[in-house]
Image (cartoon, grey):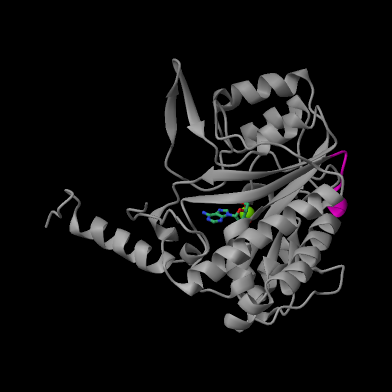
Amino acid sequence: MISQHGLKAEEEQELRKLHDRLSTDRARRILHVNSEVRRHLRDFFLKEGFYEIPPVIIGPVTDPLNHPVAGTGIEYYGYRYSLTQSMIFHKQIALLSCDKLFAFSPNVRLEPLERRGTGRHLAEFTQLDMEVKGASRNEVIAIAERMYCYVIGHVKATCRSDLEYFRRKLHVPSRPFMRFDFTGAKREYGEEFETVLSFRAADPFFIQDISLNDREFYDREDPERPGILLDMDMIYPEGYGEALSGGEREYELEKIMERIRKKKQNPDQFRYYLAVAGMGLPQSAGFGIGIERLVRFITGIPNIEEATPFPKAIGRFSL
Ligand code: AMP
Ligand code: MG
């Protein structure tokens, strides 16, 4: 059936659902939490001496990701650009002009349909993406721990009535958080180790030393332990799953090329990045944390599609 405005019935239905949802007190509270999460994250990084850099929306090269997503190419004056899937390469390059940076970076990832209904995936989301020149993995893990405790502590204070409304009791954990070794955790808890451990945990924890084939080429291989990456994921407790991913980065052209070859990727796809890497990139480490997942965890809402006013739902028409 076609509506008065020429919309299909399911499109009209989606818009009605959106209109109804945004008109509720619940939506206002979630938006308040979203807004406060952004404020406290920004305050935290500015207090720690980071520069906020503007996000990159389009570019001739973007994160290839470690799983297949549909392309998002656009025409750019005779060039083929894509929408940013993550700012990883631009973060590394921007460290030429400062020592510590962060961005609220919108990412578009046309995720596979299997990721529909996970409650954790959107086709457009925002990462607080940060990078630190000369840092080790341990140093950025320590920043992630301080960041988490800062944001949870401040949200508890400024969103008290929202947390009561959602019956959400959050606590600021003690640091350092627990760490699990990727291969060891897989051996002990099976393929679904992340989910198992997340449901079991009362506090966030890290999974580190991920195998080379399980992550992108830019995560740094441990020179002492070939095949093991100096990277990590932080996982939320209570079954909320992955919060952030990060680690040390490859920064030397030869090593980057070797890693691209090992991943059987086409270096040509990354030629603009490789050209800059050839001019010299700083050694660095960093991470990216998804804002909508953090809002979902803080409010305890089951579906990430509620965490933001205009969610781009996987496989479905969305405003
Ligand atoms: P990644 O580097 O792919 O691990 O992405 C960094 C962070 O962004 C993840 O740890 C999540 O918090 C978030 N994220 C990644 N993909 C999505 C998605 N499709 N929808 C919502 N958040 C996401
Ligand atoms: Mg990840």
Q: Which residue is at the front of the view, 7 or 242?
A: 7
Q: Residue at x 36, y 63 (%)?
A: 19
Q: Residue at x 70, y 56 (%)?
A: 39
| Placement of 206 over or under 284, stated as above or below | below
Instruction: For residue 190, say whether it is visible.
Output: no
Q: Which quarter of the frame holds ligand 1?
A: bottom right
**Residue, far top:** 78
Rendering quarter of residue 14: bottom left
Residue 132 at x, y = what percent?
82, 42
Q: Which residues are magenta?
A: 133-139
Q: Which residue is at the front of the view, 88 or 260?
A: 88
| Placement of 314 over or under 263, stated as above or below | below
Q: Residue at x 55, y 41 (%)?
A: 85
Residue 231 at x, y = what percent?
75, 51
Residue 35 at x, y = what percent?
62, 59
**Residue, far left:** 1
How many numbered dots are placed on residues in this image?
A: 0
Rendering quarter of residue 101: top right
Instruction: For residue 150, say whether it is visible.
Output: yes
In this picture, residue 204 sits left or right of residue 260: right
Residue 109 at x, y = what percent?
49, 46
Looking at the rendered image, the quarter that the N terminus falls into is bottom left
| Placement of 239 over or under 254, stated as above or below | below
Residue 136 located within the stretch drawn in magenta? yes
In this picture, residue 166 sits left or right of residue 237: left
In this picture, residue 29 sits left or right of residue 51: left
In this picture, residue 141 sits left or right of residue 115: right
Residue 86 located within the stretch drawn in magenta? no
